[in-house]
Image: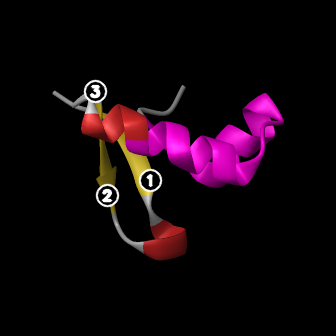
Amino acid sequence: MSATLTNAEAVTLTSANRSTLKAKFAELIAAGLVEAHGKGRGVFYARKR
């Protein structure tokens, strides 16, 4: 399993709405649990170390 996840991969895995997942990733970033790398459509998320 990859150590990173894109929003598109999360949509495929969960069948959740793209906007919902984007908001959830924002919550995880605010909580300090994950960090975003890249910008725009190229962003991917990784667990914060």
Q: Residue at x 67, y 53 (%)?
A: 19
Name the spot of residue 17 as percent of width and height, x first: 77, 45
Determine whether, in the image, residue 15 is placed left or right of residue 8. right
In terms of secondary structure, where does tag 3 sit?
loop
Above or below, comparing residue 11 to residue 32 in the picture: below
Q: Residue at x 78, y 37 (%)?
A: 16
Specify the segment rendered in magenta: 4-26
Which label sits on residue 29?
A: none
Q: Earlier in the sequence, mark 1 or mark 3?
A: 3
Query: Could one spot residue 6 in this view of the protein?
Result: no
Name the spot of residue 43 as percent of width and height, x first: 44, 62
Which label sits on residue 44?
A: 1
Q: Nearer the viewer, mark 1 or mark 3?
A: 3
Specify the farthest residue to the right: 15
Residue that badge 3 annotates: 33
Q: Amino acid at mark 3?
A: Leu
Q: Earlier in the sequence, mark 1 or mark 2?
A: 2
In terms of secondary structure, where does tag 1 sit?
strand
Q: Is residue 18 magenta?
A: yes
Residue that badge 2 annotates: 37
Q: Amino acid at mark 1?
A: Phe
